[in-house]
Image (spheres, helix red, strand yellow):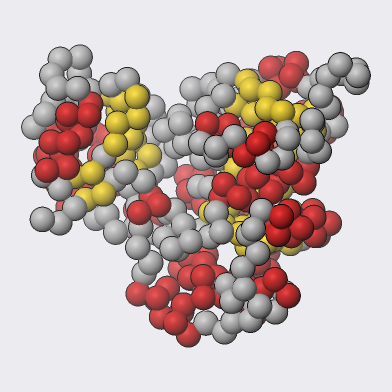
Amino acid sequence: MQQIDLRSDTVTLPSPTMRRAMAEAQVGDDVYGEDPTVNHLEALTAEMLGKEAALFVPSGTMGNLIAQMVHCGRGEEVVVGDQAHTFRYEAGGSAAVGGIHPHTIRTAEDGTLPLDAVRDAVREDNVHYPRTRLLVLENTHNRTGGRVLSLAYLQAARALCDEVGIAFHCDGARLWNAAVALGCSPATIAAPFDTLSVCLSKGLAAPVGSLVVGSQPFIHESRRARKLLGGGMRQAGILAAAGLIALTEMQERLVEDHEHAQRLAEGLTASGYRVTHPIESNLVIFEQPDEGAAPAERSAVWREQGVLISPIGGRRFRAVTHYGIERQDVERVIEVIGQTA
């Protein structure tokens, strides 16, 4: 039985073009800065996002950690949402490895942080307090159903960071989806931020890899932090080659994932499930009716019929559309889930 896996867009398989590019990639030692394919990927990403430089890293988690470590010293503070991926799902790395203190703010339903609350979170200069150094936002926002932060909000957050004197970082794991949803270039979204971490291995379907992006001095320090974390890779051009295909050939097709998510949400609603957030990208968070089997039991039934969707707490589930999921797959998912409404 063919499986339709909607657990995450991290389950994508590399395209045939990616596989060929990986097999034929020119490589060198990237720790020495001598891998031409990695260098090309870094330069292209920086150009696409309107920044000076970029650094190839194994994962988005490492990218976010590197950014926080470069922006913040030990005992200093990052302001972050209580539903942010960096706070909830990155193993406490900023505290455990970087010695960075998280100051959480309640995340709004649309994925934003109220800017008045951000302003209030910034510490005054007092020997008793950690120094506030950084604000982190996430675009698109995972826990709020792939919501897209507006350009106006990002610009207002930039102005606030300038006002209070802190840096501004984007967890842009799905920034490419945000650009498609807003109908603008990735550079337009990136412009208000000092630094970003962007993934190649979700909607863009590369098998591995993310990039940290920012100024030349920032990337110089990021390279040192990457080494400290064990992220220096050697002939990494084999991986970077897939990333180049991801950036040049896979961005435009993200609109298909968004359309599939919309159709899935419509079908779930018609079947009696409640979609809890507006569908703005490729994530669908939905809630089962009060009666009937528990979420884990429903998920197990769906799995037996070839549909993989994970419960995420309470009576809710998350489904993620991605490369490899076609319209007929979405219709099959609607059929299977509808049988357990």
Q: Is residue 197 left or right of residue 192?
A: left
Residue 165 at what x, y percent from top left?
A: 85, 32
Residue 24 at what x, y percent from top left?
A: 48, 85
101 above or below 196? Answer: above
Residue 163 at what x, y percent from top left?
A: 84, 28
For the point 15% across and 56% down, which residue is it?
A: 2
For the point 57% across and 84% down, which residue is it?
A: 26
Q: Is residue 102 left or right of residue 286?
A: right
Q: Is residue 202 left or right of residue 229?
A: left
Number of numbered tags placed on the structure image: 0
Q: Nearer the viewer, residue 85 or 117?
A: 85
Q: Nearer the viewer, residue 321 or 234?
A: 234
For the point 55% across and 54% down, which residue is it?
A: 59
179 above or below 30? Answer: above
For the point 11% across and 39% down, which residue is it?
A: 335
Q: Is residue 188 visible?
A: no
Image quadrant where residue 320 sits? top left
Residue 179 at what x, y percent from top left?
A: 53, 49
Image quadrant where residue 294 sits? top left
Image quadrant where residue 226 sits? bottom right
Q: Quadrant of the C terminus?
A: top left
Q: Quadrant of the N terminus?
A: bottom left
152 above or below 71? Answer: above
Q: Is residue 315 left or right of residue 10?
A: left
261 above or below 120? Answer: below
Q: Is residue 124 visible?
A: yes
